[in-house]
Image (cartoon, rainbow, N blue to C red):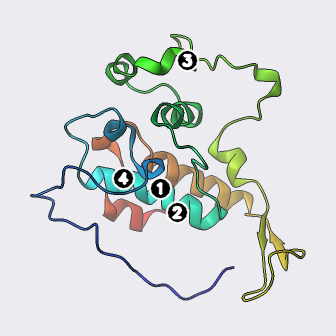
């Protein structure tokens, strides 16, 4: 359910940027592609920005962006389906890409039985809101549909948070200043 109460919790995974841990200890579906591909530059603020994008999507849509994906290669495949082919050096490094895509980055599965994959499609789906403290077995209290303007603004900020190049992801100041 939705509430206007905000609470920041669980600082157990926090660390000094100058002294990053070897492992972040967060679910893979919140990790950026550079971390999944074992890039040395992976741990840092850009990793947090990617995770923030995943979190914003999940808060707004009430479902994780990369839902029920437990395999690193399937997760990378979903990223490519949403955001396109990654930089060539990452593409070449990802050995399992041939199981999902041709060399141009085109999905190998039968396209006719696949739903269109984009943030815009995901953000256009209705959100069902249940009564706080009520049962989830009944009907939704109300259905919310994000306005077209909010869909566009949210897609814009998410694409900027999910930029493959960690150096080009939005900075915190830019996120706070974004129209969304």
Q: CA distance from mark 1 to mark 3?
A: 27 Å
Packing grade of label 3 (10 A; few <14, some 14-19, many >=20) is few
Q: How many marks?
A: 4
Q: In what element is the residue under mark 3?
A: helix
Tell me which residue sits at (30%, 50%) in the image.
46
Q: CA distance from mark 1 to mark 4?
A: 10 Å
Say if residue 105 shows up in the picture: no
Residue under numbered circle 1: 53
Which of marks 2 and 4 precedes in the sequence? 2
Tell me which residue sits at (58%, 51%) in the image.
65
From the image, which quarter does the N terminus lie in? bottom right
Residue under numbered circle 3: 99
Query: Closer to us: mark 4 or mark 3?
Result: 3
- Image marks 1 and 4: residues in contact by CB distance under 8 Å: no
User: How far from the left and from the top, in percent, is residue 60?
Assistant: 62, 65
Residue under numbered circle 2: 56
Quarter-of-image position of residue 167: top left
Packing grade of label 1 (10 A; few <14, some 14-19, many >=20) is many
Say which mark, if any, is on residue 170. 4
From the image, which quarter does the C terminus lie in? bottom right
**Which of 163/94 is in front?**
94
Q: CA distance from mark 4 to mark 2?
A: 14 Å
Q: In what element is the residue under mark 1?
A: helix
Q: CA distance from mark 3 to mark 2?
A: 30 Å
Which of marks 3 and 1 precedes in the sequence? 1
Which of marks 2 and 3 precedes in the sequence? 2
């Amino acid at each position: 359910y939705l509430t206007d109460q905000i609470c920041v919790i669980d600082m157990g995974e926090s660390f000094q940027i100058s002294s990053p841990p070897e492992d972040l200890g967060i679910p893979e579906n919140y990790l950026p592609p550079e971390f999944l591909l074992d890039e040395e530059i992976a741990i840092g603020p850009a990793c947090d920005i990617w995770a923030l994008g995943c979190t914003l999507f999940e808060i707004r849509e009430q479902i994780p962006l990369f839902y029920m994906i437990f395999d690193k290669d399937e997760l990378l495949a979903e990223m490519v389906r949403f955001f396109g082919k990654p930089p060539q050096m990452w593409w070449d490094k990802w050995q399992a890409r041939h199981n999902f895509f041709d060399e141009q980055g085109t999905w190998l599965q039968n396209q006719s039985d696949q739903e269109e994959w984009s943030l815009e499609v995901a953000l256009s789906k209705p959100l069902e809101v249940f009564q706080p403290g009520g049962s989830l077995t009944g009907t939704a209290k109300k259905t919310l549909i994000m306005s077209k303007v909010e869909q566009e603004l949210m897609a814009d900020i998410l694409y900027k948070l999910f930029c493959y190049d960690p150096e080009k992801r939005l900075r915190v100041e830019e996120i706070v200043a974004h129209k969304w």
